[in-house]
Amino acid sequence: MRTEIELYLRHLRAERQASAHTLRSYGGDLEELRRFLSAARRGGRDAPAGRISLEDLRAYAAAKLRTSRRSTVSRKVAAIRGFFAFLAASRRIRRDPAAQLAAPKTEKRLPVFLPIDDMERLLNGLPQGEAWAERDRAILETLYSSGLRVSELVGLDWSSIDLENECVRVLGKGRKERIVPIGEVALDALRAYRRELHAACIERSAVFVNRRGGRLTARSVARFVKRYALAAGTAVSPSPHSLRHSFATHLLNQGADLRSIQELLGHASLSTTQRYTHVNLDHLMKAYDDAHPRAR
């Protein structure tokens, strides 16, 4: 199965423009499946993809459900289904054993976001004065101002930022490009950060770099966010994605419509954006009471 996994990952990279994160996740999930099936075979031999049955795959999913969250198993099932669908479509196997493999129902979790007061406390408490402090300020202001995914943030180049028109060109999931507005406060933070980079003689196409001049990683950004949130004493311990959730929630609470928020976030489906309608029911009830002629 190793050869088929490599072929599939190559296909995802070349034909689907999958991100490095997706490739790592899918590759790890499929390698885990390969090891599980090999261990189940006599002598621990590698299982040929053409001889794997639906029962084999169900046994793997059941084993994972005993040790992993349902959302994790759902992701693994998605990787398996995509893998075998590719093998069947390219005629490397005669039938697709994963066609009837069902993913477990996942629990619906509401987005974690910061109230506006906590967000203000976090952003107003950020350090200033030297390149790396200005970088961190620019990171958090940009995340909150534009609702970017952390992968989109660390992938930004200076050529993607239009200072004059106050917008940023983002390459999102599936290599889909979108234009997102960015606020003046975030732009000022980016300008201050770039001046510090010039003063330190650091010239790179990447916007956010580490002390060695390399592009910053998503994991590093997550560490910065947690550290500053702890120092600010916020009610929740946020991740970079929490700032994206905060961006969407605060826009909705201030009257932005769901379709506009969908475009800003780069969601392929409006149903993904609709989960933000559940995070502040009081706001929605007030809007209903104010707008509906028969509400009272």
Image (cartoon, rainbow, N blue to C red):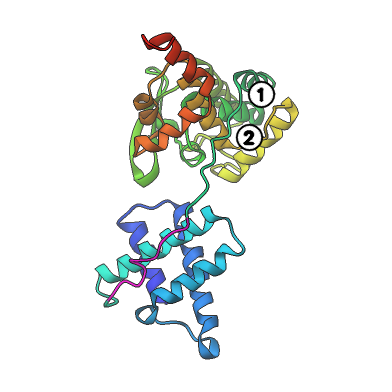
Front residue of 58/149: it is 58
Query: Is residue 188 left or right of 174 when viewed as pictured?
Result: right
Residue 148 image point, x, y percent: 47, 33
Front residue of 90/81: it is 81
Residue at the image position 54 percent from the left and 27 percent from the top: 246
The residue under label 1 is 122
Q: Which is more foreground, mark 1 or mark 2? A: 2
Residue 153 image point, x, y percent: 49, 36
Q: Is residue 210 above or below residue 256?
A: below
Q: Is residue 96 magenta?
A: yes
- As drawn, the label of residue 276 is none
Q: Name the image quarter holding the N terminus.
A: bottom left
Front residue of 85/14: it is 85
Find numbered disc 2 in the image and state the secondary structure of the residue it sits on: loop
Q: In the rendered structure, which segment of residues is drawn in magenta?
A: 95-104
Q: Is residue 151 magenta?
A: no
| Neighbours of disc 2 within 10 Å: few (<14), some (14-19), many (20+) | many
Q: How many marks?
A: 2
Tell whether label 2 touches label 1 (CB within 8 Å).
yes
Residue 183 at least partly seen: no
The residue under label 2 is 238
Residue at the image position 53 percent from the left and 68 percent from the top: 62
Give the amino acid type for the residue marked by disc 2 in the picture: Pro
Among the two numbered marks 1 and 2 on one chain, the one whose residue lies closer to the N terminus? 1
Front residue of 77/214: it is 77
Find numbered disc 1 in the image and state the secondary structure of the residue it sits on: helix
Residue 98 at least partly seen: yes
Q: Is residue 147 above or below residue 79?
A: above
Give the amino acid type for the residue marked by disc 1 in the picture: Leu
Q: Is residue 172 above or below residue 144?
A: below
